[in-house]
Image (cartoon, rainbow, N blue to C red):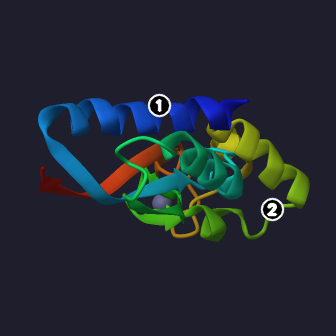
Amino acid sequence: MHEFTIAQGIVDFLRETYSTKGYRITSFKIAIGELSMFDRNIIIDLVRELIKGTELEDAKFTVSIEEAAIKCGTCNQIHTFKELTKSLSNEEKEMIHFIPELISSYARCPSCGSRDLKILTGRGVMVTDIAVQRE
Ligand SMILES: [Zn+2]
């Protein structure tokens, strides 16, 4: 279960980086890349469960989906995943979700028609906006 590994990694990272250095985390945000295939609700439940009974218990957190940004290597325009894949079938979109590298095989840059497409963001999971207080 990938979500568990990710949630555990985030909680461990926050505790090791801040709590052990005398800071109390009051809030943080988790951004899940839209191509990462992680289930937002599962991540929320797992993080809530994992911080229970720890110094992070009272921290507020939100989990959002980060739109993927894809850059055309020919004209340098940056497009969203939705823009690039709106003319594709659901099966093709699903394939790209599983293997994002396939985007160059299915989609073309809407501005210049090139297939030289690189995924910039939207694949990983990030922790942002970590607010802390000195203990
Ligand atoms: Zn282009």
Q: Count up the numbered dots.
A: 2
Q: Position of residue 52 (x, y in %)?
A: 52, 46
- Vertical placement of residue 4 versus 119, above or below: above
Q: Position of residue 100 (x, y in %)?
A: 64, 40
Q: Residue at x 63, y 57 (%)?
A: 108
- Vertical placement of residue 49 versus 66, above or below: above
For label 2, the residue is 88
Q: Residue at x 28, y 29 (%)?
A: 16
Q: Position of residue 63 (x, y in %)?
A: 52, 61
The N terminus: image quadrant = top right
Quarter occupied by residue 41: bottom right
Q: Position of residue 17 (x, y in %)?
A: 23, 34
Kind of residue at disc 2 = Leu
Task: Judge the density around disc 2: few (<14), some (14-19), many (≥20) Cα neighbours within 10 Å.
Answer: few
**Label 2 element class:** loop
Which numbered disc covers residue 9? Answer: 1
